[in-house]
Image: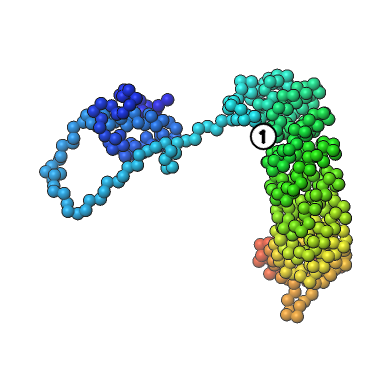
C-alpha cells in the first residue's frame, strides 16, 4: 500500500547490492528535504525501510543519468577562497530504530487471559460485540467462556448471566474457567467473573476456587485485580477456608499493609476473618504504630483494627499511639487516626487527645492537618471540653491579642471557628457572635472569610444582636 509518491519503476537488482552503474551510497545523492519527507512517511508507518531504499535507488539512477549543470558564468569557476570552508553537514543514515524517527508502534493486540497464542478475537466474540440485536445466552458461548471473560463486553455479559442463570449453566461456565482461573483472577476483566462465582456460586464451587488460590494468596493480594478476588473470597467462604487463606500472609503483613493493593486485603481480613485467626496481623503492628499511622495505607489498616478488634488486642497499640499523639495530630496521615479515636474511641482515649489540644488550640487550628483534629475535639468532646476550648480562644491575652480574631482570618482556623458556632450552646454562641461582629468589616477582605461572615450574620439576625 505505497502512496502515489512511492509508485514507479523499480530496478530489479536480484536482491543483492545496488543496480548496475550505481556506485554511490543512496543517502549521498538524495536531496535532504526529500530524505526528510521519506523519513516522516516511514515514521508514520506509510513506507517500509525496504520501500525507502528502493525509492532512493531509483532517484540515484535518475540523478546519475543527468549531465552536470552548466556553469552560468566564468565567475562560477573562481579560485577557491583562502577563507576556511565550512565542512558540509554530516547526513545521518536513517534507520527504522533511530530515536528521532522511530516508526509508529504497531497496533496493540489483545492477548487472551490465558496468555496463549491467540491475539485476535474469535469470530464468535467479534460477532457478539458487533451484533446488538441478537439476544445471546450462556449456551451460545460455550467453548469461548475464557475468551469472553477476558473481554470487557463478554465479561459483563457473563457476570449478568451468573446472577440469574440456572445451576446447570453456572456449572458449564465454571467447568470452562476452572483450568484458567488463576490467570482470570489477575485479569482486568476476568477477575469480575471469578468474583461473581464467590457471590453466586454454590458451596462446592467456592470451595474449589479457594483451593486453587492456595500458595498464591500473597501474589494475588499484591496484584491490582487479584486483591479484589482475595477480598471477595474472605467475604463468602467458610471460616475454615478463610483461616487457610489468611495464614499465607503470615510474615508478610507489613509488606501488604504498605502496598497499594495488599492493604485492602489486610483491611478486609480484619473486618471479616475470625479475630482468633488474625492475631498475627495485630502483633505485626507492635512497635510499628507511628510508622504505620503516618503511612498513607497503614493509617487505614490501623483504623480498621481499632474498629473491629477487642479492647485487649488494641490497648497495646493505643498506648503506643499515645506516646506520639502530638506528632500524629499534625501529620498528613496520622491526623486521620487521631480523628478516628475522637469519633469512635473509648472516653479515656478521647480525653487524652483533647488534653493535648487544650492550651494549643490557636497553633493547632492554624495547622493544615491539626485543624481537622481540633474540629473533632469540639464536636465529639464533652460539653466541659467544648467550653474550655471556647474560653481559650475567646480570652484576651496579656499582649492584647485574642486568638478568636486571629483564627477567623486564618485559612484553616476559620473552619474551627465555624464548627465552634455550630456546636456551641446558645449562651456560648451569642458570646462568640458578639465578639466577632465588630470584626466583620475587616473579615470581608479575606476570600475564605465569606462562609464565616454568612454564618455570623445569620446568628446576628436570629438572636437580634446589636
Residue 133 vertical position relative to residue 285 in the rendered view, above or below:
above
Coloring basis for residues: rainbow
Residue at 42% in and 40% down: 98
Residue furthest to the left: 74
Left or right: 30 with respect to 119? left
Residue 2 coordinates in the image, percent (x, y): 40, 26
Is residue 74 in view? Answer: yes
The residue that appears at 31% across and 28% down in the rendered structure is: 17
- Residue on which disc 1 sits: 187
x and y percentages locating residue 365 in the rendered image: 74, 66
Label 1 sits on a secondary structure element that is loop
Mark yes or no: residue 8 visible. Answer: no
Which corner quadrant holds the N terminus? top left
Toward the viewer: 381 or 317?
Answer: 317
The quadrant holding residue 95 is: top left
Residue 157 in which image quadrant: top right
In depth, the one of 435 and 131 nearer the eye is 131
Q: Residues within 10 Å of mark 1 (few under 14, many from 20)?
A: many
How far from the left and from the top, in percent, is residue 277? 84, 45
Amino acid at each position: 500500500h505505497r502512496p502515489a509518491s512511492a509508485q514507479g519503476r523499480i530496478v530489479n537488482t536480484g536482491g543483492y547490492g545496488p543496480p548496475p552503474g550505481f556506485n554511490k551510497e543512496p543517502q549521498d545523492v538524495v536531496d535532504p528535504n526529500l530524505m526528510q519527507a521519506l523519513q516522516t512517511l516511514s515514521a508514520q508507518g506509510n513506507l517500509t525501510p525496504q520501500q525507502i531504499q528502493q525509492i532512493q535507488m531509483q532517484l540515484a539512477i535518475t540523478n546519475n543519468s543527468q549531465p552536470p549543470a552548466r556553469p552560468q558564468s566564468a565567475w562560477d569557476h573562481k579560485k577557491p577562497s583562502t577563507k576556511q570552508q565550512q565542512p558540509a553537514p554530516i547526513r545521518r543514515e536513517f534507520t527504522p530504530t533511530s530515536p528521532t524517527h522511530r516508526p509508529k508502534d504497531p497496533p496493540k493486540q489483545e492477548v487472551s487471559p490465558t496468555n496463549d497464542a491467540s491475539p485476535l478475537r474469535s469470530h464468535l466474540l467479534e460477532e457478539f460485540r458487533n451484533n446488538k440485536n441478537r439476544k445471546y445466552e450462556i449456551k451460545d458461548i460455550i467453548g469461548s467462556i475464557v475468551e469472553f471473560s477476558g473481554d470487557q463486553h463478554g465479561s459483563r455479559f457473563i457476570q449478568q448471566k451468573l446472577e440469574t442463570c440456572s445451576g446447570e449453566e453456572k456449572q458449564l461456565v465454571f467447568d470452562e474457567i476452572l483450568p484458567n482461573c488463576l490467570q482470570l483472577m489477575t485479569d482486568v476483566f476476568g477477575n469480575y467473573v471469578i468474583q461473581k462465582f464467590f457471590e453466586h456460586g454454590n458451596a462446592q464451587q467456592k470451595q474449589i476456587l479457594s483451593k486453587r488460590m492456595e500458595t498464591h494468596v500473597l501474589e494475588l493480594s499484591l496484584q491490582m485485580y487479584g486483591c479484589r478476588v482475595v477480598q471477595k473470597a474472605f467475604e463468602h467462604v467458610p471460616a475454615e477456608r478463610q483461616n487457610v487463606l489468611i495464614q499465607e500472609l503470615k510474615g508478610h503483613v507489613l509488606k501488604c499493609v504498605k502496598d497499594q493493593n495488599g492493604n485492602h486485603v489486610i483491611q478486609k481480613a480484619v473486618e471479616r476473618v475470625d479475630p482468633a485467626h488474625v492475631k498475627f496481623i495485630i502483633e505485626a503492628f507492635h512497635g510499628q504504630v507511628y510508622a504505620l499511622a503516618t503511612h498513607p495505607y497503614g493509617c487505614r489498616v490501623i483504623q480498621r483494627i481499632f474498629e473491629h478488634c477487642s479492647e485487649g488486642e488494641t490497648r497495646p497499640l493505643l498506648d503506643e499511639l499515645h506516646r506520639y499523639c502530638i506528632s500524629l495530630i499534625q501529620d498528613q496521615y496520622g491526623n486521620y487516626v487521631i480523628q478516628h479515636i475522637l469519633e469512635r474511641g473509648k472516653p479515656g482515649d478521647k480525653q487524652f487527645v483533647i488534653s493535648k489540644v487544650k492550651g494549643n488550640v490557636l497553633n493547632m487550628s492554624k495547622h493544615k492537618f491539626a485543624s481537622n483534629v481540633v474540629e473533632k475535639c469540639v464536636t465529639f468532646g464533652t460539653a466541659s471540653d467544648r467550653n474550655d476550648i471556647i474560653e481559650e480562644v475567646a480570652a484576651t491575652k496579656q499582649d492584647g491579642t485574642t486568638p478568636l480574631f486571629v483564627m477567623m482570618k486564618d485559612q484553616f482556623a476559620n473552619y474551627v471557628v465555624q464548627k465552634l458556632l455550630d456546636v456551641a450552646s446558645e449562651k456560648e454562641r451569642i458570646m462568640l457572635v458578639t465578639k466577632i461582629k465588630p470584626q466583620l468589616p475587616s473579615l470581608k477582605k479575606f476570600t475564605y472569610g465569606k462562609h464565616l461572615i454568612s454564618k455570623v450574620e445569620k446568628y446576628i439576625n436570629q438572636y437580634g444582636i446589636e
